[in-house]
Image: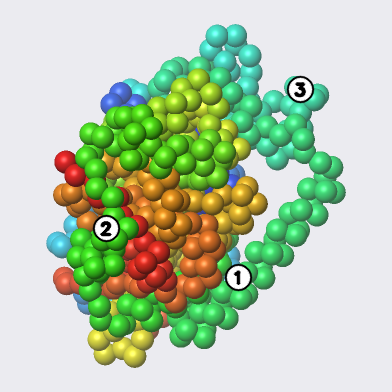
Amino acid sequence: MPPRPSLLSPPSPPLSLLPLSRTPLWIPSSFRLPTKTPFDSSSRRFRPVSLPVFSSGAPVVAEAAIGSRGVEEEEVEGSKFLEVGYISTTHGIRGELRVVSSTDFPELRFFKPGRRWLRTRILGKEIISEVELTGGRSHPGKKCWIISFSGIDTVDKAKQMVGSTLLVSEEDRPELEEGEFYTHDLVGMKVVLKETGRLVGTVINVFNYGADDLLEVMPESSKPDLSYHGSHVWVPFVEAIVPDVDMDKREMRITPPRGLLELNLRSDVGSKKERRQLEWKEKKKSQRRLIAAKKKLIEMDQKHLLEGLRFGDKAQKSWLAKQIAEIDFKLLQRAMESSSIPHDRHNLSEFIDANSAVLLKNTMRLSHKYLMRNESEGRNDSNYELHEQGLQLLLDSKAAIILVVNNKDILERGFETDNVCVGRHEPMVNRFEELLLDCKRFLKVEEQVISIPLVIVCPDHEIQLYKDCLSDNEYFGIVNQKVWFLEERKLPIISTSTDQKRNKILLKSPWEILQAPTGCGGLLSLLTSHKVVDDLNEMGIEYVQVCSLDDRSTIGHPLFVGFVSSHGADAGIKFMEGNKGNDEFDLIFSMRFINSISKQFDKLQFCAVPERHVHVEQVENEWITVHPDKPNSYHLHCSIYSAFNGCPLDSICIMHVMG
């Protein structure tokens, strides 16, 4: 059985996001992947670690505090086991082995001699056998441990153990501090409302998808008007919502926010036959996409991505299949072709300077103070008619707004993005609120409904923050049916082509493709694939503002919309003095131009940004982890300004904002 490099963090499955908690929450929608994160309930701090992702019919659970989910606990010879690591390869010539840890207690598990167990798959059957650990030590410079077993003193004997999972008896698990829990102890607990004592349901799984653990609760089918078949309730395992956990009574008392429990219950489900037919159609559609994607990978000589479909458990193979099926091959091929041609990255200032002779004719200059005041000096003001023209377009729902949350901008402000929490992103959420409040002020509709379509594009783990913000503020008066949340477009990371004839797509594990955001240039592909362009056309939209979430952006400003409209331009650029580069932008495109450029991906220009990435490779049928000491890969990036390649210069106008 090929070894599995679980020192690399496992992939997160597809998500259906919960829009009510202020914490970023993750809800799986199609399959169940065991996850593991130690959890300190007093400080609510998380330390993400590696985890086992192979399941077994034996009663084996991941050894971790809150965050890991156990598999079915059937008795095996009267004992239960905990996974603590897996054996990845041999070490040296004396029968030593390297083990990749999946435990929070590596010194205890790998240093202290004593009984251990190995789980091995032979001819499709899992066998658990007892071994004697004689000692161990950490591997200097490697994220693994070196161990030795009694009776294993040659390389040949050691090779027979490679790929096995190392287990300990559940009776040997360390005592946790107050407020900490082993997650599999939570499974099966009753969930009741603290205020009324009403039974909500039973915990059947625990997952971690970002900052918090989620309890999957199967509700009691006590309401005849609701069908609970296949339904579940997701409850964030945070102190504000789950204040009391009584292990003795096997009961937890919750104080959920209004609407949380009803969120996933469907009162409009059809018959069982209809549901099965729908599921069958979706399954067939997914299979067709996967078959087409596999053929494309073979054509591109990237068939190494398919190796993970040959082994591993069902969840791992399903996750890899989903990633493969979702690759935008048209955009990927364009990115690889474009990035192979040397060129400078787009720079707005240089673009304006180089084409000033033409662009100067369609340039307006004004102060930032004047712009934000949003007032003209009556009909004698030269901008009065432009302001009124833009205001009418906005009030008539002829303009839409696309707001892009840029990860790089967050990082430059000092906010981490791996473990998202409200505190770290609070300034960005506050800025989001300010933009929408300013939009209402610009439109002078503080107490009225806004029917402007709004599209928010951001990393998947941040979507919940902005959903919560809109929900908490009653969508700022925006019609919620006209709000889209889209996860930013990503493309695979490719290797540098040194001695190779091709750029190879890199893998984080045999079942996870290394990917990175394409930059805002991938926005048009994203809008097209999600049918947003079609929806905007059906709504009669004439102009679309696309801007980044930063300190100087303004959305829905009548003067900017009116200025672009009055020139009949296909593209309008708001250029702020002191612009920090391509990560800050405020643009308006006509729908005519968006319809055109969305069919011309060859106009987009990508840059291959050198980066260093840890990845796995298969060498002589063994998966190894590569730790490069210099850039070994390319991140394919496309600036939003590359869209101007498809726009004539005389159809571009510029609003130059000073001060």
User: In the rendered view, does 167 fall on the left or right side of 658?
Assistant: right
Number of residues whose C-alpha sits closer than 10 Å to that of mark 2, classed few (under 14), some (14–19) or many (20 or more) = some
Relative to the observer, which residue lies in front, 242 or 250?
A: 242
Number of residues whose C-alpha sits closer than 10 Å to that of mark 3, classed few (under 14), some (14–19) or many (20 or more) = few
What count of labels does the image hold?
A: 3
- List x then y, in percent, for residue 203: 57, 31
What residue is drawn where x is 61% and y is 31%?
263
In the image, is residue 142 above or below residue 64?
below
Per the image, the residue denoted by label 2 is 582
Which quadrant: the C terminus?
top left
User: Cα distance, mark 3 to mark 1?
Assistant: 40 Å
Amino acid carrying label 2: it is Asn
Q: Image quarter for residue 161? A: bottom left
Q: What kind of element bears circle 3?
A: loop
Residue 341 appears in the picture as rendered: yes
User: In the rendered view, does 383 fall on the left or right side of 609?
Assistant: right
Mark closest to the chain's N terminus, 2 or 3:
3
What residue is drawn where x is 51% and y is 79%?
297
Relative to the observer, which residue lies in front, 245 or 609?
A: 609
Q: Residue 223 — which label?
A: 3
Q: Nearer the viewer, mark 2 or mark 3?
A: 2
- List x then y, in percent, for residue 253: 52, 17
Residue 619 appears in the picture as rendered: no
Q: What kind of element bears circle 2?
A: loop
Per the image, the residue denoted by label 1 is 290
- List x then y, in percent, for residue 354: 21, 70
Amino acid carrying label 1: it is Leu
In the image, is residue 534 above or below residue 417?
below
User: In the rendered view, does 389 fall on the left or right side of 211?
Assistant: right
